Structures are given as C-alpha cells and as structure tokens.
Image (cartoon, rainbow, N blue to C red):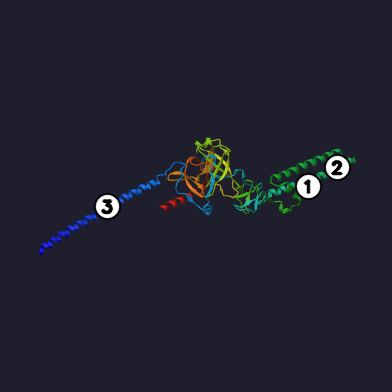
Amino acid sequence: MSNLITGLQGRLMGRLGVGLLTGLLCGAFGMRLWMTRETAHGRQSTQGDHSHEKGKPGEREQGVVKLSPETLKINGIEVAEAGPGTLERTITLPGEVHLDADRVAHIVPRVSGMVREVLKKLGEPVKPGEVIAILDSRELADAKAADLAAASRHELAKANLERIQKLFEKKIAPEEELLKARQALAETDIDHRTAEAKLHALGLTEQQVESLHSEKDTDYSRYEIKAPFSGTVIEKHITLGEVVNPDTTCFVLADLSNVWIDVTVYGQDIIHVHVGQTAHVKAEGIDGDTTGKLFYVSSVIDEATRTATARLVLDNVEGRWKPGLFVRATVSVASQAVAILLPLGAVQTVEGQPTVYVEKSGAFEPRKVTVGDKNATHIEITSGLKPGERVVVKNAFIVKSQGMKSELGEE
C-alpha cells in the first residue's frame, strides 16, 4: 500500500514540473516577441524623425547653434551680409625670389692701391655716399700732383700775359711776344683742364678737386670707395693690406627693399598670362600673401624647359622675402560678376553637402546651398541663399564643430 502511494506522488510531481517548465518557456518567448516589436517601432520612429535631414538647397536644418558675443570675439568668428562680388579666375604657378637686378651694384675701385681701411662687414646696411673702404693709391697721388702742377703753370702763364700786355700797351714789348704769351696761357689752360678731367674720372667731385691746395701731403694718396645707393653688403672680397685694382670686385651691394619674383609659365598657360595682371604670392614659412603686378613676360620660350618667365616686383621693406626662396604665384587671368560671393571658408561640408551658417535671432542655423565657380579665396553661391542674409564668413568651421557637439550631446 505504501509503495502505491509513493508511486502516485512521484507521477504527480513529474507532471507538475513539466507544466512549470512549459509555462516558463512560453513566458520567455512572449517577452522576446514584445521586445522585438518595440525595437522595430523605435527604429521606425527614429527614421521618421530624421527623414527630413537630407533636404534640398535652401531648406533649413536642425542643429541651430547659439554662441555668446564673447565666444564669437574670442574665436574670431565674423558675420557679414551675403552680396554680389567679382570672382577672379586664377592659375597657380611656381616661382622664385630674385634680387632686383636694377638695384645691384658690383663695387670696384677706379684706381690701383693698397687697402688702408675696411669700414663695412658682410650683411651690414649702407647709405648713399657712405665710405665703405679706403685705399692708399700712388696713381691717385700722381694724378693730383699733375693737376697741381698744371694749375701752377696756368697761373704763371696768366701772370706773364698780364705783364706783357702792359708792356705792349706802353709800346715796350713787341706784338709777337704778346701773341706767344697768349698761346702759352691757352696751352696751360688745356693741360689744367685735362688734369682735372682725369681726377673726375677717378671719382673725385668738383669740390674735392677745388680743395686740393688745402690738403695735406699725406692725403694725396687717400682714395675712398663709396656706396652708390642705400642697400646691404651681400658680398665682400676685400681685406686689410690687400692690393686691389680696377678689375677687383671689392663689394656687392643690393637694395633689398624690393625683390623680383620670377614665375615659370607653362605652355598651356602662356596664352592667359599678360603684363599688368595681378598675382598673389605665397611661400612656406611666411604668413599671409603679398600682391604684385606682372611687369614683364618673356617673348621667347626656353628651349630646354619649354616654359616662359613672368616677373613681378614685391615690396620687401620688412625683409621677409629672401632671394632664392621658392614661392607660389596665383595669377588672376579673368574675372566675372556673380550675385553672391563668399569667402571660401564660409562654406562647410555637412553630410556631404555644402552648407553655410545663417544668423537668425542671435543663433546660427545651417543652410544647404548650391555652389558655382571658385578660386583660391572665394566661391560663388548659386542657390539656397539670398542677398542681404547674414552668414558666418570667417571661422565657420568652429560653428560647425559646435553644432556637431550639440547633436552628439543630444544623442
């Protein structure tokens, strides 16, 4: 009897366990089905919320950015009205900085002599007429002595003529003697003028020639080498005690306040480059750019490189443009008027589309636009923006990054 009861209890417990296990499995399956439906519904809702993001040019976007005036000032964000402008078509060409060949001087002495003093070093500035070296020259001393002798003979001939003139007037001296005295004066005058001309050829001024009689004997051999214009000593080939002659280049001076930019013009671009065009010059390591105008375009193509050379002058008072520096010159070859012209940095790429940030009630909202032609600095807006609307024209990428941060924070 006890065995029968025990068997019935075992069967009952087995059926109860199977029922409990079946209930748990059904509950788990129902929960999973409910979560799957909720997830699908959430995805559909999310897709519905973002279905408007990829709009057409001119449509307003989500992600309005609000920035305080202090933030705008600190980050250098500038806002301006969209309006018409002139879009320049440009080509960018390689170039190199050169000395202004019209302002380079190779200083040579006009006489032979020994170097007494060297007053300027390599790299030092000079002024017009400034003495940069002094020579002791026997040749100059001989020329000065010859002039002094010629001047003395001229004075004697002049005094002799005056004496004979008085005697002739008193009928004491014959006319023949008077004519000889006049001839002697003319000859000494020619000799004197020749001696002075030689001194001028050696570099002495009129004042220096006239003051020869007041000089000391030791100064007759002093020859001064002077700077012809303001510039910088870029080469020096003279040392103390060295003997130099008119074939010796003692110094090379260059006026570095202006430099030449020689631009290489390729064959396909030659037809577009002309004298008078504006060029913007940039170089690695130099902030900003400098503008100049082409004043020369070669008429002959180089046989080796098949290129032409265009040249412009740049102001170099600050000394930023070093001769030998490689540069890039952007030459304006044409221009056209456009309805809306913005700086290149004003247009940002958001979700693969060009976008500008329009100011509305102290905030900035992204606006998709359609762009046209552009150059190295500006771009044309063909649709999506109206003239007069205020947009971010400088450091727009900062506004873009703030908008992206806001969207990420919301997510």
Labels 3 and 2: the sequence-earlier one: 3
- In the foreground, 227 or 72: 72
**Crowding at mark 1 (Cα within 10 Å: few <14, some 14-19, many 20+):** some
Labels 2 and 1: the sequence-earlier one: 1
Q: Residue beneath label 2, please?
A: 164
Which residue is at 78% across, 45% downward?
Answer: 153
Q: Position of residue 231 (x, y in %)?
A: 62, 49
Q: Could you tell me which secondary element the residue under label 3 belongs to?
A: helix
Asked if residue 377 can be seen in this view, the reply is: no
Q: Could you tell me which secondary element the residue under label 1 belongs to?
A: helix
- What's the distance in space between the residues labelled 3 and 1, CA to CA? 135 Å
Question: Where is 265 relative to 397, above or below?
Answer: above
Label total for image: 3
- In the foreground, 259 or 300: 259
Amino acid at pointer 1: Ser
Q: Position of residue 57 (x, y in %)?
A: 46, 41
Relative to 194, 46 lies left or right: left
Kindly identify which numbered label has been placed on residue 152: 1
Asked if residue 270 can be seen in this view, the reply is: yes
Q: Position of residue 369 (x, y in %)?
A: 47, 42
- What's the distance in space between the residues labelled 3 and 2, CA to CA? 151 Å
Q: Position of residue 118 (x, y in %)?
A: 64, 53
Kindly identify which numbered label has been placed on residue 341: none
Mark 3 in CB contact with mark 1 (< 8 angstroms): no
Which of the image's four quarters has the N terminus?
Answer: bottom left
Question: Where is 72 relative to 309, above or below?
Answer: below
Q: Residue beneath label 3, please?
A: 30
Amino acid at pointer 2: Ile
Labels 3 and 1: the sequence-earlier one: 3
Amino acid at pointer 3: Gly
